[in-house]
């Protein structure tokens, strides 16, 4: 079988095409370089650890299993003591939670799943292979010696490192921690985030719209995306489209949070105050304009101890640039060290047309599998950064390299699931 590399993108192609913009990979690198991981540690009960980032490795507190125990309901015996008749008297019982009993020579013992294997027994016969007659039992199918016994320490040994620091604790990790006997978990303090919304035209979804107003998509969308990464949302502010109000809000927010997300106003129009504001404040602007479609104006900077991620106002641009740049930067600050940008290979049904220049991240939905088992995705022939409908059924974004006009059906494409 030929294995395809998990992901090996030679470059997104935008390097050749749009010289005055930063490539996506350079922008990600420059953004990540601004991100200093949180160091403050707190301890939480295991039940509250889901979604938190592990601050120290998790070690097994004991051998697991702790003692040899039965993997089946059945009968424990020493196989060499089984006579040719395959019949033995049954004496005693070993149940889960009870101390380890001792098997009398020349007998079998009733045993239940999880119960300690009696001293002197080397095999458990499942009860389906035993015919019981009062005090005696006959084995109808002799198992191999050692069958149906879960050995002490076969899963983990005392002191084994089971999870590394930097892991985001998912339900499977909670199970590992519980199995290791760890009831309290050292985690990094939560990422503190503030959102600053710009746009005089914006009203909260649900409010009535006056002439010229539109519903604010980005705030609820960003709040949901932040909830996804278990961030601590410190403040959300909607500022009028003036530089002074934006500046004040940004400075005040920077005292309280690790990450400021601004929405809108990052382009080059007269009403776009984000970049001039960052300049006035002397922020260290590491990313300003990226060869990405949608979301070209995305800007990433550092102001005092906060990283400012300035997303474009068009909702799809904001969504895409969050997935490609914002999320990994936030994850790094939060202390995550693994699986920062999950990606995989897919094929696109019917191939993909694309206007060369910037590399494009286009919403795509998984529609099936090709004969080799690779996922096949479908995507719209084109998208607009203001139109949300392509997100409805999307499972992720495909990356269409900037220098490629047509991706033929069957060619591998990089896919960012969300
Ligand atoms: P801007 O990035 O501020 O120039 O905005 C670009 C476009 O996105 C404009 O059409 C805005 O009305 C729209 N827009 C900006 N912010 C939002 C938002 N929060 N929700 C929906 N549309 C927005
Ligand atoms: Mg605006």
Image (cartoon, rainbow, N blue to C red):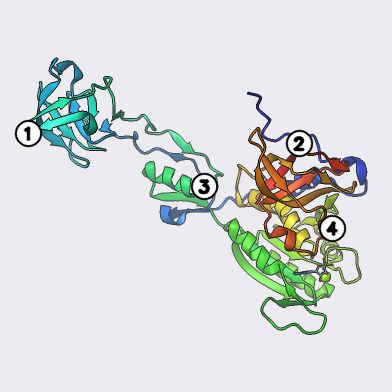
All told, the count of numbered labels is 4
Q: Secondary structure at mark 2?
A: loop
Q: CA distance from mark 1 to mark 4?
A: 82 Å
On the image, the x and y values in percent for residue 327 come to: 68, 53
Q: Earlier in the sequence, mark 2 or mark 3?
A: 3
Q: Is residue 91 above or below residue 391?
A: above
On the image, the x and y values in percent for residue 319 come to: 72, 58
Residue plotted at (28% across, 20% down): 144
Circle number at residue 309: none
Name the residue that disc number 3 marks: 54
Q: Are marks 3 and 1 in contact (CB under 8 Å)?
A: no
Name the residue that disc number 1 marks: 134
Quadrant of residue 151 in the image? Answer: top left
Q: Earlier in the sequence, mark 1 or mark 4?
A: 1
Nearer to us: label 1 or label 4: 1
Name the residue that disc number 2 marks: 410
Q: Are marks 3 and 4 in contact (CB under 8 Å)?
A: no
Q: CA distance from mark 2 to mark 3?
A: 40 Å
Task: Check the picture and name the quadrant holding the N terminus.
Answer: top right
Circle number at residue 297: 4
Q: Nearer the viewer, residue 162 or 374?
A: 374
Q: CA distance from mark 2 to mark 1?
A: 67 Å
Q: Secondary structure at mark 3?
A: loop
Residue plotted at (16% across, 30% down): 131
Q: Is residue 382 above or below residue 377?
A: below
Q: Secondary structure at mark 4?
A: loop
**From the viewer's perspective, is 158 left or right of 400?**
left
Nearer to us: label 3 or label 4: 4
Residue plotted at (54% across, 50% down): 53
């Amino acid at each position: 079988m030929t294995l395809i590399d998990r992901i090996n993108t030679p470059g997104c192609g935008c390097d050749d095409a749009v010289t005055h913009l930063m490539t996506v990979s350079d922008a990600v690198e420059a953004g990540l370089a601004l991100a200093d991981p949180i160091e403050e540690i707190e301890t939480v009960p295991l039940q509250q650890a889901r979604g938190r980032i592990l601050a120290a490795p998790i070690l097994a507190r004991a051998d697991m299993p702790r003692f040899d125990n039965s993997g089946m309901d059945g009968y424990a015996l020493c196989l060499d003591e089984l006579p040719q008749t395959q019949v033995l008297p049954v004496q005693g019982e070993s149940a889960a939670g009870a101390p380890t009993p001792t098997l009398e020579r020349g007998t079998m013992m009733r045993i239940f799943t999880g119960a300690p294997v009696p001293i002197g027994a080397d095999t458990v016969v499942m009860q389906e292979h035993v015919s019981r007659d009062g005090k005696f039992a006959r084995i109808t199918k002799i198992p191999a010696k050692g069958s149906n016994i879960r050995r002490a320490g076969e899963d983990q040994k005392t002191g084994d490192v089971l999870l590394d620091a930097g892991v985001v604790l998912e339900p499977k990790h909670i199970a590992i921690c519980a199995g290791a006997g760890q009831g309290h978990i050292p985690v990094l303090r939560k990422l503190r985030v503030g959102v600053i919304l710009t746009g005089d035209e914006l009203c909260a979804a649900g409010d009535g719209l006056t002439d010229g107003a539109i519903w604010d998509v980005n705030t609820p969308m960003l709040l949901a995306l932040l909830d996804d990464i278990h961030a601590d949302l410190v403040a959300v502010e909607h500022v009028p489209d003036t530089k002074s109000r934006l500046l004040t809000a940004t400075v005040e927010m920077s005292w309280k949070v690790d990450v400021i997300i601004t929405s809108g106003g990052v382009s080059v129009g007269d009403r776009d105050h984000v970049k001039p504001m960052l300049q006035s404040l002397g922020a260290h602007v590491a990313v300003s304009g990226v060869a990405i479609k949608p979301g070209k104006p995305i800007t990433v900077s550092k102001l005092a101890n906060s990283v400012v991620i300035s997303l474009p106002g068009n909702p799809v641009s904001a969504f895409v640039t969050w997935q490609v740049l914002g999320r990994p930067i936030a994850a790094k600050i939060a202390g995550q060290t693994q699986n920062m940008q999950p990606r995989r290979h897919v094929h696109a049904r019917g191939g993909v047309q694309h206007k060369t220049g910037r590399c494009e991240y286009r919403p795509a939905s998984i529609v099936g599998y090709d004969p080799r088992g690779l996922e096949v995705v479908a995507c719209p022939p084109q998208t607009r950064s203001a139109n949300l409908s392509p997100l409805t059924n999307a499972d992720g974004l495909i990356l269409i390299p900037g220098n490629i006009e047509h991706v033929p059906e069957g060619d591998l494409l990089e896919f960012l699931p969300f």
